[in-house]
Image (cartoon, rainbow, N blue to C red):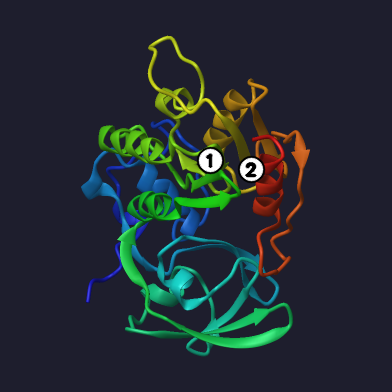
Amino acid sequence: MKKLVTLTAFCAISFTAMAQPSPPVEDRNSLEAYLFQAFAASQAQQRASLFHIGIEAEQHADGHLVTAVLEDYPAFYAGINRGDIIVTSNGRRFDPVASFNGEISSQYDLAIDRAGSQLEITVTPIFENLFDSYRNATASSIQEFSAGNKVIGYVRLWALSKNTSDIVSFKSLMARLSHCDGLILDLRSAYGYLDDVHSNSFLPNPSGNDYFGKSVVVIVDSKTSVEGAKLARKLRRLDRIVVLGSETRDGLKPELNAPYPFTQTSRGDAQFETALNRLLGTI
């Protein structure tokens, strides 16, 4: 079994010398620190891997509140939801990193508080760096919905990357959705580095490249990074593109306010449903 490589071992990475998608965090062994390191690393072999289950979480009085779940990762398949509070792992207080990277086990029993109901869910973590996890989750998020004779596309852009292969992958992703009559672009938790290709895929551009010229609803929230908010700002210049959700961490206020507190647990996604209804009213 592989052992955890901590961030402090990656002395070759200069956090202060590189362009940063968000400020470094104080806890170098937090999920946020691993996420920052993975996207800041200039080479694939420099990205620190760890055992994780594919969640974003923040500290809560009773444990850790799940604020996002990556598609096709252990938490997703185990049925862990946004809004769940993970209290313990194998009987010990839960931590998104320490719980899976101390005494390594093949499976972990998580005690979860879901809106006052107590659940126990078993998960098997995956060993992977978060750059790869976020790019994989982006590819796995793509969906299409039929509404009468219209087709609506959806993608959650977890990873923003200037890497050449990732730009090619992004272009391929957009080509897959080009037939859709409207698109929901989910930028909640969008992280990384913005490239002109990301905005040029939606806006008329001097190079004459193909772009998605139909109605788009962009979803943002307080977990959207500075670079993700920058993309949203570029896209909402056109009348056919509207930004919806809640205020981002850098102060971007969407035209359509759609609150969805992380503590709110429900079967549906309130912001997605609002975006879908908005799009259906315009296409």
Q: Nearer the viewer, residue 78 or 174?
A: 174
Q: Is residue 242 left or right of residue 173?
A: right
Q: Is residue 198 above or below residue 117?
A: above
Residue type highlighted by circle 2: Val
Whole-percent x, y for residue 169 in the image = 31, 39
Closest to the camera, between mark 1 and mark 2, is 2
Residue type highlighted by circle 1: Pro
Q: Secondary structure at mark 1?
A: loop
Q: Secondary structure at mark 2?
A: strand
Q: CA distance from mark 1 to mark 2?
A: 19 Å
Question: Which residue appears at 40% of the width and 64% of the height?
Answer: 72
Question: Which residue appears at 42% of the width and 50% of the height?
Answer: 138
Mark number displayed over residue 23: 1
- Residue 108 sits in which quadrant? bottom left
Question: Which residue appears at 40% of the width and 26% of the height?
Answer: 197
Q: Is residue 234 left or right of residue 52?
A: right
